[in-house]
Amino acid sequence: MVGDTGDYGQARRPDESGHRAVAQEDEVRIEAWAASREHCLAEAVAAMVECFADVSGVRPTGVGRIRLDEASDDDLLAALLDEVLYRLEEYGQVPVDVEADEAEGGLDVRLAVAGLSDVRLTGAAPVSVTWEDLRIGPGPCGWSCAVTVDG
């Protein structure tokens, strides 16, 4: 499951996870970090959701599953965030918890979701993922990623 947010600028331990989002004009820059690629992807989803909704204390009303075929790490990050935005727009579903697991030939993601009307909105939901400056990869303290979403 996703972890707590923290200060990305401070030294991290390899077992720490977290995320942050920095609002810029009509976009938000998301940064996430975790011990594994899968947990880093889950943190990125949590960061994107926090850009527009407060899901603390919200109980999920359903579970969605996503199967992403094996691709580059950058493609997986973009595809996962795009899928979350699609489910938000088409079905009004907001992830309140995320688990991602490596699976043979891809990635399995479980989204515990609530309806958009069940969460407190704190801003406008993003509408797209920007490929410019998108990155995800391993480092000395685990995995990290950064991506910009347009509002």
Image (cartoon, rainbow, N blue to C red):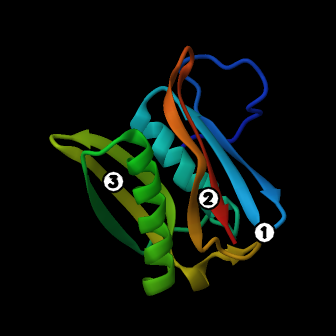
Q: Are marks 3 and 2 in contact (CB under 8 Å)?
A: no
In the image, taking residue 72 as reference, residue 91 lies left or right, namely: right
Callout 3 amino acid: Val
Work out whether 148 lies above or below 116. above
Work out whether mark 1 precedes mark 3 in sequence or the reverse, and give the earlier one.
1
Work out whether mark 3 precedes mark 2 in sequence or the reverse, and give the earlier one.
2
Q: CA separation, marks 3 and 2?
A: 16 Å
Task: From the viewer's side, name the closer residue of 12 and 145.
Answer: 145
Q: Which residue position is annotated with label 1?
A: 26
Give the total number of marks visible in the rendering: 3
- Percent from the top left, x then y, of residue 145? 56, 38
Q: Which residue position is annotated with label 3?
A: 109
- Percent from the top left, x then y, of residue 73? 40, 40
Classify mark 2: residues with Cα within 10 Å, few (<14), some (14-19) or many (20+).
many
Q: Which secondary structure, mark 2?
A: helix
Q: Is residue 1 visible?
A: no
Q: Residue at x 51, y 68 (%)?
A: 59
Task: From the viewer's side, name the closer residue of 9 and 29.
Answer: 29
In the image, taking residue 109 as reference, residue 31 lies left or right, namely: right
Q: CA separation, marks 1 and 3?
A: 28 Å
Q: Which residue position is annotated with label 2?
A: 48
Q: Which secondary structure, mark 1?
A: loop
Q: CA separation, marks 2 and 1?
A: 14 Å
Q: Which secondary structure, mark 3?
A: strand
Q: Are marks 1 and 3 in contact (CB under 8 Å)?
A: no
Q: Residue furthest right?
A: 25
Callout 2 amino acid: Met
In the image, taking residue 9 as reference, residue 120 lies left or right, namely: left
Callout 1 amino acid: Asp
